[in-house]
Image (cartoon, rainbow, N blue to C red):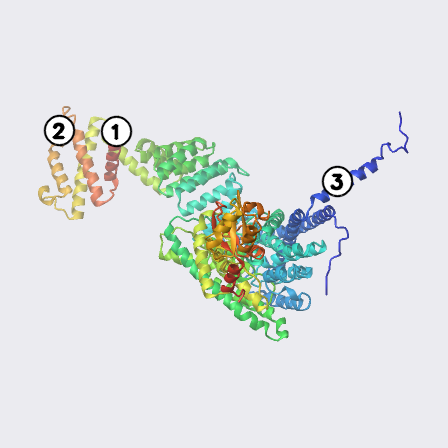
């Protein structure tokens, strides 16, 4: 079989080029039509596989989802939605080897549309998986300031909250704090959002700002039991026991099952009843509280010494135990308790309470966290120390 | 005053004016198209048509793959066994009955067309290659689409050249021009395609064709990118090269790649003639058997070896396979490709070569990281370098291999690792396998064609090799004849060089000079009695071939310095040239 092409009669170059141009144009159109039809078929097939992949991903069947998205991409290799979904599921599969592939897909997408907030958020999550604070922060910020296709404000807030949680997890409270300040300033008047912000402040041990956020929640919804409990706890942590007592009491009333709040309320009540430095109490009451605190400190020291096997009767110079030293100081100061009533002894209450506080702190260090009145005394001592600092 | 219509001064009818303008324009255009320009423009059209053909070819492969195997073949599916085997049968029937000239990759056939068949590649070759390679690759045979694309491009170019009745000299060049277009379109890499065609198809550096090859390659890539997008073949990961000590690791990769290349090439070289020698009826079943072997490999857990395998290379580049899997894939791909290729199934070896290199690169890179955790090169970097390594070692195209990696990765940071690894691979391969794979295949087919490797190793004789020392007696054209005659009395030479004024050289024999003296022309300057035409001079670094044109016409040819043409470096004569050729006899191609 022999296939020969017809001979062209004219040997005129311009005519030849004209014919070739026409032939190229016709072939171009033909191939264009073919490619368009092929692509249309492929895209339809890709959409079907993509839908299947989404279903698998939402059911946490990551391997099936990866296979479906990969197949969808073989049908429509440039589809950025498929690439993004594959990257997300590769990342969520928790296989470190797949993280590289996820990142490469996302970086390719990022190079095409660096302003796409969804791509930046996905990249931020990959960086967070890797534990890279710098990259994650950069991509989270890109996501916050990038273009969202829907609900931009809510998505930006979510991205910032995610960043804060990541920074807290990575033990970077300073960076988290600055993000939280920005978050608090931009929050809409929504109780849930303020509640979340308050919890984040609480996680960062910023109880003052946490209290402010809880109070904002209570302003919007005064009967929010989580906010009441949270406000009580935040006030308690800041040493604002009067406020803590008020919120905790309401929280316990609103939710009688809240054991944490109930316990905190008990400690708060104890502090408020035992604190000799509380304002608006009589001298007699103050002296009673000092005497009670002293007695409790002696008891605590004795118990702690017994627990640790320290003989308090042996002089401190021999045992070199701080407990023995405290015992001798308590013994020395005990006769002075009787002089508390004397108006001339203005420094005596502080002197006695200093020994009491030192005893509580030392026994807490040696014998573990105390309970009841000892805990109340310890907390009062910590608050005074913080105030003096 | 009105002019009568019949008057010669009458204004011609507008249609007549248009006709005259068209004719004038046409004849002006015709004058502008001398053959070289026309050939360059034709190269662009070759690129366009080849690009369009390759677009259709790729669609055909994808369509076949989807129709026969589905978008993502799953292991343990009997479809994996049935499809490549049955497709192999169909391909065998087509090859044996309709398209007998399309077996193998097509690179050799294109080269043979250039050197033996005056650039003629039947158009049915393009048709047959298109259909059979699409079925074979689409059904999962372990072959690539690049070499068939090269042959389709060359076949289209050859058909176009014959259709236009261009000169035989130009027709010969059409095949490589089309080959470059086809390969560039298949690879989406014009520079590598141009270099490969020069290194492997043309087999020698030829400036005359370079422009056409480049034009066709670029225009075909533009066409492919227009239709199929400009996405690269792989998603290139971040590639880095920081410490020079890491070059040791790349050198190890080069050595491993070189050894793998030798095994791959020797397997093909050993099995191909033996399978061809089997009875003809077995040829109906050889592609089917190859398909069955590939299908079995896929069935038992390695579907990545099917087809070109670009997706698997992409995954390897992103570290998705453990090193053992990478090593197994490399070995299985060598087995699968060897069997697919030697069975006579039409398809190329480019993509499988890249696949094997990528997997080996990944495996070696992983092991290197395990042994030396301080290495900074990612697995992706080793995979990329590995691709070039196999290219250099197996196909023995060192320049193409370097540029291919650079073009595919778009990253020049890894050029040093690529060069180091490729050099080692090339040297190991050359040391253990003297004949490159494409040359081996042509020799198995009974042909001996020139190659660039051969040219590189060829000893080139230069003028300086045959040059005689500067003669003791050099005459001056400004001196009188009798003075010159007096000067030659002490010399035994029979021919003398004459320095002309202000520049140039001539020669005169002892007899001629003595005759002039006897004729009473002793009072004349030698320059005034010498013939007007001077003797051409040569430079020492010129090839000795260039002296052959002069040594018959002139008894002595001066060899002068390139910086100062009046400074004589030596002379050559016919005897000295022939003596040199006689002393260095080489038999080319043995």
The residue sitting at 14% across, 24% down in the picture is A344
Name the image quarter holding residue B59: bottom right
Q: Quadrant of the C terminus of chain A?
A: top left
Question: Against A231, is B382 above or below?
Answer: below
* Label 1, label 3: how far apart the Cα atoms are: 110 Å
Residue B151 rendering spot, x and y as whole percentages? 62, 58
For mark 3, give the secondary structure: helix
Residue A314 rendering spot, x and y as whole percentages? 9, 44
Q: Which residue is mark 1?
A: A278
Q: Are marks 2 and 1 on the same chain?
A: yes
The residue sitting at 76% across, 40% down in the picture is B24
Q: Which residue is mark 2?
A: A339
Q: Quadrant of the N terminus of chain A?
A: bottom right
What label sits on residue B25 in the rendered view? 3
The residue sitting at 36% across, 57% down in the picture is B371
User: Which residue is farthest top?
Assistant: A344
What label sits on residue B494 in the rendered view? none
Of residue B471 and residue B401, the one placed in the foreground of this image is B471
**Dot 1, how many residues are within 10 Å of its Cα: few (below 14), some (14-19), or many (20+)?**
few
Question: Against A387, is B553 above or below?
Answer: below
Q: Are marks 1 and 3 on the same chain?
A: no
Of residue A273 and residue A234, the one placed in the foreground of this image is A234
Of residue B522 and residue B193, the one placed in the foreground of this image is B522
For mark 1, give the secondary structure: loop
Q: Chain of mark 3?
A: B
Of residue B421 and residue B385, the one placed in the foreground of this image is B421
- Residue B549 visible at all: yes
Residue A21 rendering spot, x and y as whole percentages? 71, 47
Q: Chain of mark 1?
A: A
For mark 2, give the secondary structure: helix
């Amino acid at each position: 079989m022999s296939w020969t092409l017809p001979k062209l009669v004219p040997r005129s170059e311009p005519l030849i080029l004209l014919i070739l141009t026409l032939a190229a144009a016709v072939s171009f159109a033909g191939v264009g039509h073919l490619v368009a039809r092929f692509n249309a078929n492929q895209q339809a097939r890709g959409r079907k596989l993509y839908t299947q992949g989404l279903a698998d991903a939402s059911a946490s069947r990551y391997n099936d989802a990866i296979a479906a998205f990969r197949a969808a991409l073989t049908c429509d290799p440039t589809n950025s939605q498929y690439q993004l979904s594959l990257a997300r599921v590769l990342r969520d599969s928790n296989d470190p080897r797949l993280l590289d592939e996820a990142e490469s897909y996302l970086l390719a997408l990022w190079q095409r549309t660096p302003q796409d907030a969804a791509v930046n958020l996905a990249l931020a999550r990959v960086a967070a998986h890797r534990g890279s604070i710098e990259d994650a922060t950069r991509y989270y910020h890109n996501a916050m300031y990038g273009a969202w296709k829907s609900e931009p404000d809510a998505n930006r807030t979510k991205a910032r909250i995610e960043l804060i949680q990541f920074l807290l997890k990575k033990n970077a409270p300073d960076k988290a704090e600055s993000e939280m300040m920005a978050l608090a300033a931009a929050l809409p008047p929504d109780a849930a959002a303020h509640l979340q912000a308050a919890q984040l402040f609480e996680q960062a041990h910023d109880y003052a700002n946490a209290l402010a956020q809880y109070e904002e929640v209570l302003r919007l919804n005064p009967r929010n039991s989580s906010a009441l409990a949270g406000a009580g706890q935040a006030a308690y942590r800041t040493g604002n026991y009067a406020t803590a007592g008020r919120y905790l009491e309401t929280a316990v009333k609103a939710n009688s099952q809240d054991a944490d709040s109930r316990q905190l309320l008990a400690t708060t009540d104890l502090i408020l009843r035992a604190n000799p430095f509380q304002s608006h109490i009589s001298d007699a009451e103050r002296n009673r509280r000092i005497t009670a605190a002293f007695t409790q400190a002696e008891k605590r020291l004795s118990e702690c010494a017994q627990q640790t096997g320290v003989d308090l009767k042996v002089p401190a110079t021999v045992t070199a135990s701080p407990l023995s030293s405290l015992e001798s100081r308590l013994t020395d100061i005990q006769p002075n308790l009787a002089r508390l009533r004397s108006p001339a002894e203005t420094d005596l209450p502080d002197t006695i309470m200093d020994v009491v506080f030192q005893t509580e702190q030392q026994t807490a260090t040696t014998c573990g966290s105390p309970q009841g009145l000892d805990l109340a005394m310890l907390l009062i001592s910590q608050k005074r120390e913080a105030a003096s600092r | 005053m009105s002019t009568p219509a019949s008057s010669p001064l009458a204004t011609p009818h507008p249609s007549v004016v248009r006709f005259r303008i068209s004719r004038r324009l046409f004849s002006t255009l015709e004058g502008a198209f001398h053959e070289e320009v026309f050939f360059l423009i034709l190269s662009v059209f070759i690129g366009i048509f080849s690009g369009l053909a390759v677009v259709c070819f790729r669609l055909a492969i994808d369509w076949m793959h989807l129709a026969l195997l589905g978008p993502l073949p799953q292991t343990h599916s009997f479809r994996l066994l049935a499809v490549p085997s049955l497709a192999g049968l169909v391909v065998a029937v087509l090859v044996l009955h309709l398209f007998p000239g399309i077996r193998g990759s097509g690179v050799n056939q294109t080269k043979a067309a250039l050197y033996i068949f005056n650039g003629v590649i039947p158009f049915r070759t393009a048709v047959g290659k298109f259909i059979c390679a699409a079925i074979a690759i689409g059904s999962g045979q372990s072959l690539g689409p690049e070499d068939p694309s090269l042959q389709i491009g060359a076949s289209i170019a050859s058909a176009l050249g014959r259709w236009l009745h261009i000169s035989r000299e130009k027709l010969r060049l059409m095949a490589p021009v089309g080959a470059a277009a086809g390969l560039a379109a298949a690879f989406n890499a014009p520079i590598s395609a141009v270099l490969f065609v020069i290194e492997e198809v043309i087999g020698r550096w030829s400036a005359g064709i370079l422009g056409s090859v480049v034009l066709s390659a670029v225009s075909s890539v533009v066409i492919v990118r227009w239709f199929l997008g400009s996405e690269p073949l792989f998603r290139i990961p971040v590639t880095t090269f920081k410490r020079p000590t890491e070059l040791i690791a790349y050198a190890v990769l080069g050595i491993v790649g070189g050894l793998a290349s030798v095994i791959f090439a020797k397997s093909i070289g050993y099995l191909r003639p033996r399978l061809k020698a089997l009875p003809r009826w077995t040829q109906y079943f050889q592609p089917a058997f190859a398909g069955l072997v590939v299908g079995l490999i896929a069935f038992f857990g390695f579907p990545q070896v099917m087809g070109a395998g670009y997706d698997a290379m992409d995954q390897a580049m992103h570290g998705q396979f453990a090193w053992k899997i990478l090593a197994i894939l490399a070995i299985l791909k060598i087995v699968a490709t060897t069997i697919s290729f030697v069975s006579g199934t039409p398809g190329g070896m480019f993509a499988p070569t890249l696949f094997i290199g990528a997997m080996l690169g990944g495996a070696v890179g992983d092991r290197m990281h395990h042994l030396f955790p301080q290495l900074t090169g990612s697995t992706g970097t080793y995979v990329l370098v590995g691709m070039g390594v196999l290219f250099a070692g197996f196909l023995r195209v060192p320049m193409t291999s370097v540029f291919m990696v650079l073009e595919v990765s778009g990253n020049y940071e890894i050029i040093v690792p690529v060069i180091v690894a490729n050099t080692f691979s090339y040297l190991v391969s050359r040391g253990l396998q003297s004949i490159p794979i494409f040359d081996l295949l042509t020799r198995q087919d009974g042909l001996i064609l020139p190659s660039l490797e051969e040219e590189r190793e060829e000893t080139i004789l230069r003028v300086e090799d045959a040059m005689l020392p500067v003669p003791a007696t050099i005459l001056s054209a400004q001196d009188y004849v009798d003075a010159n005659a007096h000067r030659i009395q002490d010399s035994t030479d029979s021919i003398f060089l004459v320095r002309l004024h202000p520049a140039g050289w001539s020669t005169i024999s002892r007899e001629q000079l003595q005759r002039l003296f006897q004729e009473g022309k002793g009072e004349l300057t030698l320059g005034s009695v010498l013939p007007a035409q001077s003797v051409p001079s040569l430079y020492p670094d010129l090839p000795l071939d260039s002296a052959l044109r002069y040594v018959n016409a002139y008894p002595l040819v001066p060899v002068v310095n390139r910086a100062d043409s009046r400074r004589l470096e030596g002379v050559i004569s016919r005897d000295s040239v022939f003596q040199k050729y006689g002393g260095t006899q080489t038999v080319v191609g043995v």
